[in-house]
Amino acid sequence: LINRREKAMKYILVSGGVVSGLGKGITSSSIGVLLKAAGLHVTSIKIDPYLNTDAGTMSPYEHGEVFVLDDGGEADLDLGNYERFMNVNLTRDHNITTGKLYSTVIEKERKGAYLGKTVQVVPHLTDELQNWIERVAQVPVESDGKIKPEVCLIELGGTVGDIESMVFLEALRQFRFRVGQGNFCHVHVSLVPVVHAVGQQKTKPTQHGIQTLRSTGHSPDIICCRSTKPLERDIVRKIALSCMVPPSHVVSVHDVKNIYHVPLLLRKQRVPELILESLKLNKMPAEKLPKWSQMVAREDSATKEVRIAIVGKYTGLSDSYLSVIKALKHAANHLKLKLIIEWVESMHLEPPRQVMSTPEDIGSALPSPILTPERPTSPSKTKKSDKYKRAWCIIKSCQGILIPGGFGARGVQGKVLAVQYARLNNVPYFGLCLGMQVAVMEFARHVVGLEDANSAEFDQHAENPVVIFMPEVSKTHMGGTMRLGSRQTNIVKGSLAEKLYRSTEVMERHRHRYEVNPKFIEKLESKGLRFTGKSVDGKRMEITEIKAEHPFFLGVQYHPEFKSRPMYPHPLFLGFVKASARQEPKMMILQNLSRRISDLDLDAKSAGSKNAEKNKGKVQL
């Protein structure tokens, strides 16, 4: 019996109350870091209460980026946090959704698995969830793929009290008794806001949130309180008294400089000891996290800046490109650089009618329409013109340009212009997925001479479709039908990619429906575009470079950002950031940008435009 208890899987449930977006994923990941430092093997499961089967068909504005796993699963971005923090490789089954759960139960019912019983939420749906958790918790997630986990973190998405979460809370209530005492620990993340009028921390939201949680049959073991500043002692005692936990189990998770401080913050408040004691694990928590602390110190002390422009169409929500941001930060941290990301909406790079722009302007040191703009006569009529000038000022101020993946025709012409500028002006360029396809389109138009070169995604009747729809991909079903997951790429020796990877064979994660048209390969390569990475069968182009001397010009069809880790930055991002840092900072252009914005503000005031006043002093970054 003792041996069986020692080998029993341990579970940690992380739930959230009051509001969403409190940082349950970061809290879960940080706990995972601390438990791994104590010598435990940890895995993680994310439960999302939405009816979608997965995140694959959702707009980035809904839930942020879609994180792609090795097995091709399209998952919630929190699985990316787990993989980055804990350095594990999860599977599609580690992301449970209401859609997946109901589909599984209905499929079993159709096969007669319930032997004529009336299929109900309780017990059939709740039992299915519990079985799913127990099964997936045993799946090895370490790099060697052999060691079974000892502890499983379960993050319940959404907020306690949401109607869509009720079935999961009931299943997890049953699960706590199913696995037995000492095998289950509940961590609840809540909010302690500050009323600025009086400057006091308020506990009522947390108290009511815990009351709601307890009404579902749950009682948390640890309460992590999110706040802008460290919790005051009186506040800790008040929460402990009203929520029936010891004061030592009320943890302050206040705002920090960057998210990598969170594990250190939890360690300082003895969270590992609390969890190990609750789970009856005979392990000693790590006194210090030396490598992690060094990484955090580099982040805090970096002073030399490197300025990168991310040109995309979802720039209104940074979570849309979360893994790209993290990969850039990992590389900058490794190089002891302070990363400055400038957001550029690709549509704003496209010249409006009243601003004449030519390829020669784009290729010059700075387009003349930006340095010598005409004074606008009406802010409402020149709104697009102002955005255009601002966007190009930002592009010119940056030391490197990155175009991430995306779908749809909106803003593609602006991306083509950004690639052209980077190529002609020796500005480091890195294209991911669509960013590679746009680079091929730009080269075909302006070097090969195919002025109407396009992608079949944007023009199905293009005469020169240099990017085409992959023949095996479904044209009727959107979810889970792309070329997904980890696939091998063979790299040409002596290429930039081979120098960065230090290997001629790599495994990278893909997510795309379109590919470079093989019919144009010979014509493109004859003019200087090199395809230095291909699929195993040699039919698909995976990496592109240019023969001409350039500090860094690389496009990849896959998504290397998904495999970057804080301690192990991805080699391609490392090479890109290093090349960008070698470029001279363009301070004169930055000063010009500042002056130009001031001029626009004065124009807005004099015109009395409500729209201009609303955007006063702001730049789309």
Image: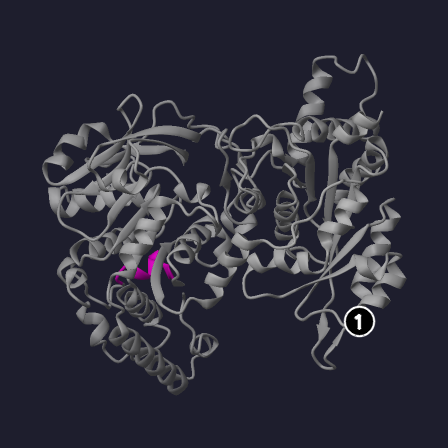
Disc 1 residue type?
Answer: Arg
The residue drawn where x is 70% and y is 69% is 230
Quadrant hosting residue 335 = bottom left
Give the residues drawn in magenta, as a range.
342-351
Residue 200 coordinates in the image, percent (x, y)? 75, 77
Q: Is residue 11 magenta?
A: no
Does 84 sit left or right of 31 as displayed? left
Q: Nearer the viewer, residue 10 or 620?
A: 10
Instruction: Count all numbered tags in the image, as a single digit.
Output: 1
Above or below, comparing residue 280 to residue 296 in the picture: above
Residue 55 coordinates in the image, percent (x, y)? 55, 39
Task: Quadrant for the C terminus, please.
Answer: bottom left
Q: Is residue 348 magenta?
A: yes
Callout 1: helix, strand or loop?
A: helix
Q: Nearer the viewer, residue 421 or 179?
A: 179
The residue drawn where x is 48% and y is 51% is 322
